Image (tube, rainbow, N blue to C red):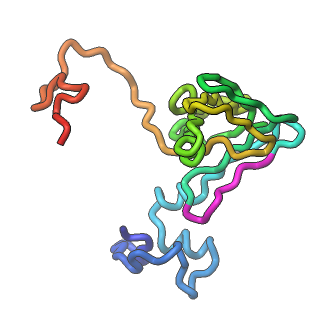
Amino acid sequence: RVLFRSPGPSRQPLFRGCPKGILPSSYSLKTSFLSDYCTDRERLLMEQILKIKKMRPGAEVPQRATEGAAGLDLRACIDAPVTLAPGGLAMIPSGIAVSLPGSGYAAFVFARSGLGVKHGISLSNGVGVIDSDYRGEICVGLCNLGTQPYEIQPGERIAQLVVMPVCPLPVQEAAELDQTQRGAGGFGSTGRS
């Protein structure tokens, strides 16, 4: 993927696969880099900010565990441990609310792989969707698919929040849909291999 392009109308690729987004030394300032090397769309994406508000005492602003992590870790904002019995459900507050840059974005709450694989702790609604106009506290619905009780500790990382672009397309009713080779085939219609 071309990460940086040369200035001017030609927009020729300048740097390919620059590790960790390192800027050329002559363009160490963000403003110079944005104006000289980025398209308008790239510039807009880089200038977007996810605003986070603490809603409860003890809430923590979510962070990425590593530089390359896609998700921000959501933590359990609870005063005491909560025990989730096998087959049990719990709604755990994160203590935060968010403001997305606009209707072209949504935030999605995903399970943490370690909790799911090691303990059977997953999200009770599959994936949580945070709409761009929602300003309430983000709460995480957890379920225990395992065979042992699991104790959720205060401040424990319980889910991850990923911000992604969405396409809020206008809806139009249609009497017919365009035909494809697959058609209405689903639920394993293409086989196992």
What residue sits 55% from the left and 63% below the top? 68
Q: Position of residue 190 (x, y in %)?
A: 16, 34
Q: Is residue 117 above or below residue 139?
A: below
The residue positioned farthest toward the right in the image shown: 57
Q: Which residues are magenta?
A: 60-68
Could you say which is closer to the camera, residue 179 or residue 121?
A: 121
Q: Is residue 46 above or below residue 61?
A: below
User: Does residue 85 appear in the picture of this structure?
Assistant: yes
Quarter of the image where the N terminus is located = bottom left
Dividing the picture into quadrants, the one containing residue 69 is bottom right
Q: Position of residue 122 (x, y in %)?
A: 56, 34
The residue positioned farthest toward the left in the image shown: 181
Dividing the picture into quadrants, the one containing residue 35 is bottom right
Q: Is residue 118 left or right of residue 136?
A: left
Residue 64 covered by magenta stretch: yes
Q: Is residue 156 left or right of residue 64?
A: right
Q: Is residue 49 above or below residue 171?
A: below
Q: Position of residue 55 (x, y in %)?
A: 82, 35
User: Does residue 96 appear in the picture of this structure?
Assistant: no
Residue 9 covered by magenta stretch: no
What residue sits 48% from the left and 73% below the top? 37
The residue positioned farthest toward the top in the image shown: 175
What residue sits 51% from the left and 30% below the top? 126
Q: Position of residue 31 (x, y in %)?
A: 62, 71
Q: Main secondary structure of the magenta part?
A: loop
